[in-house]
Amino acid sequence: MGKEKSGVNYFQGKIEEIKKDIALIRRGLGLVSEFTPRYLLHSFLRAAEDALSPFIGLYFGALILDEGASPDRDLRHMLLMVLYMCAGMFLLEFAKIFSDKRINVNAEISAAWEEIALNTKSFDLDYMDLENPALRDTRESFFSNREYAGLAYLMWSLNYLMQSVFQVVVAAVMLAGLFTLRSPLPLHGALAVFDSPWMAAAMAALLAASTVYLTIAIRRNSQKRHELYKDMPKEERTLHYYLNEYLDDSKAGKDLRIYGQQNIIVKSSREIFEKYTKLRQKLSLLWLGEEYRTSMTEAAMQGIVFLWVAMRALGGAFGVGSVVKYIGLMERLIGGVTACVGNLEWLRSNNKLLSDLFDYLDRPTLMQKEGRPVDRSIERHEIAFCDVSFRYPGQEDFALRNLSLKFQAGERMAVVGRNGSGKTTMIKLLCRLYEPTEGKITLDGTDIRELDYAQYQALFSVVFQDFRLFSFGLGQNVAANDSYDEAKATDCIEKAGLGERLQGFADGLGTAIYKDFDENGVEISGGEAQKIAIARALYKDAPFMILDEPTAALDPLAEYEIYSRFDEIVGCKTAVYISHRLSSCRFCDRIVVFEQGSLVQSGSHEALLAEEGGIYASLWNAQAKYYEEQALAEGKFREELHS
């Protein structure tokens, strides 16, 4: 009873697997039909054309041979058969060329759509998912495995599957005579045995047995290959990094020569190459093993079939032309069955990646949702952290602990502390890129989790440490949009201290940043890039201005230029500055000090310096030797302003 129940459960499990496979394929086909509506039609036609092409030669070739072997042969009839055969093959080849072009174009569209879909989903994901290493690796694997799996591969596999199915169906129909025709002559001995219905049934059973054997063998091989494919993306990415991204970067050439990095690069890339080569060798052996088993099985079947057909012909069941036809048809049938098995297994294996792809595309966004509208009638909002603690997903230690902090409307606040003290984490929570693990953050007394996500984020203009500019026009970078107010963009650029540089651009605001897409684009320095990022934050004109190390790439003079005019730049907005240069924090109304995820000090510059043994005072004294040089730079700047 137990074994019986176990067997039932096994088959139920297999049925569920098949249902899941069919559902994934149907969804994949739905997407394919959505962005390439006629792909399935062209694929169906291409499969029919490919399957029929060799059968035309077999069919008419047999007729021509039979006609030629007949004592009453008709030369005119033979020439007509040749003409029909050539015309049919010509038309099918022409149709195949047309279908191939359409299929190739649609496959390229599919691959591009898949990449666009993945990138579009990345825009919609919660930020915490973007920083999730496991999810990032999954996303990278999609791109790395697209050669072996994905929507485009689904399309190709279905195309080949349809071709093999057509091949099997047409071959089986044309082979019907081989199993049903009987010799009109009285036969004895071996000839009678080979011409009997029992031998026909035995041949059919042998064909079925070889199909089952190949199915099992191909499935096992396919599973082993896909296990190896899981390791391929990582090795390929690493190898690509060394050979393309790093060594192809002209800036890396200086480090290579000054620090003698050639040896470590060569050694590391060689180790990765050896791992990659071993994986490729294992894959090659699996392919060779599969091809060997398939070829040997097909050869054995073809030999047996050849003997059977030859004996049937000797017994008078059919003529010499039919011998050629039936042997060719049986070869096509066996090859078609093998191809069907292989393509079905590839479809099932491809479903593993399709499942991951759809899981990624279906991943819900927990934070980006509608809620209560933000009250736009309030000009100066107040935000408060209420006993907030936060721990990054998958981490045991808290990045912030029991933080209570209020941002007064219109205030200039500086946030300082050592690396890893929680400053940037606090900004991520403030901007609602993450949500507190414990406690809450309020806007004008309302928990921000109850507010509309997009409207809340619209309150902030932020310059992050790792900001990005894109290879678009300068005006597009500042406005973060294709269209923009030129006067406003120019004003923001001038306030950020890049006015003179703008005047030197031949295309003004239309000048492309970097040369990725425009050979007339300009290469900008790190300090200029930060100024453009600041101009972008100003252009957004949000109530809260947050600058996370905004002047890290600027020299002291340029930094003083920015900060000396920040009251004018920020206006009545609430401004939060994160900086390691404590001298730049002196103009702020309040300075808060973080240490190991906790808020440990708060007050003005003078008040915090007066706290003996305080973190701020120790940081200030550690940097004091640099301030004299900065003061000289500030004095020089003032002299230039007055001259």
Image (tube, rainbow, N blue to C red):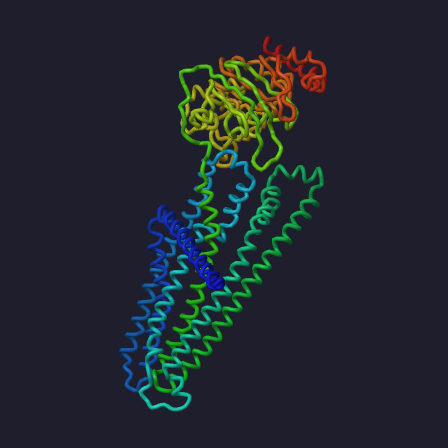
Q: Is residue 292 left or right of residue 333?
A: right
553 or 158, nearer to the observer: 158
Q: Is residue 597 left or right of residue 142?
A: right
323 or 531, nearer to the observer: 323
Q: Quadrant of residue 594?
A: top right
* Vertical side of 423 occupied by 168: above or below: below
x, y (%) of residue 32?
38, 49
Give the residue drawn at x 33%, y 60%: 95
Q: Is residue 16 left or right of residue 548?
A: left
* Vertical side of 443 occupied by 310: above or below: below
Where does the C terminus fall, quadrant-wise?
top right
Kindly tell me whether residue 87 is visible in this rendering.
yes
Q: Residue furthest front?
A: 1
x, y (%) of residue 382?
49, 17
Q: Residue furthest top?
A: 642
x, y (%) of residue 76?
27, 78
Q: Is residue 508 left or right of residue 67?
A: right
x, y (%) of residue 338?
45, 66
Give the residue drawn at x 42%, y 53%: 20
Q: Quadrant of residue 417?
A: top right
* Vertical side of 273 occupied by 314: above or below: below
Kindly tell me whether residue 499 is visible in this rendering.
no
142 or 433, nearer to the observer: 433
**Callout count:** 0
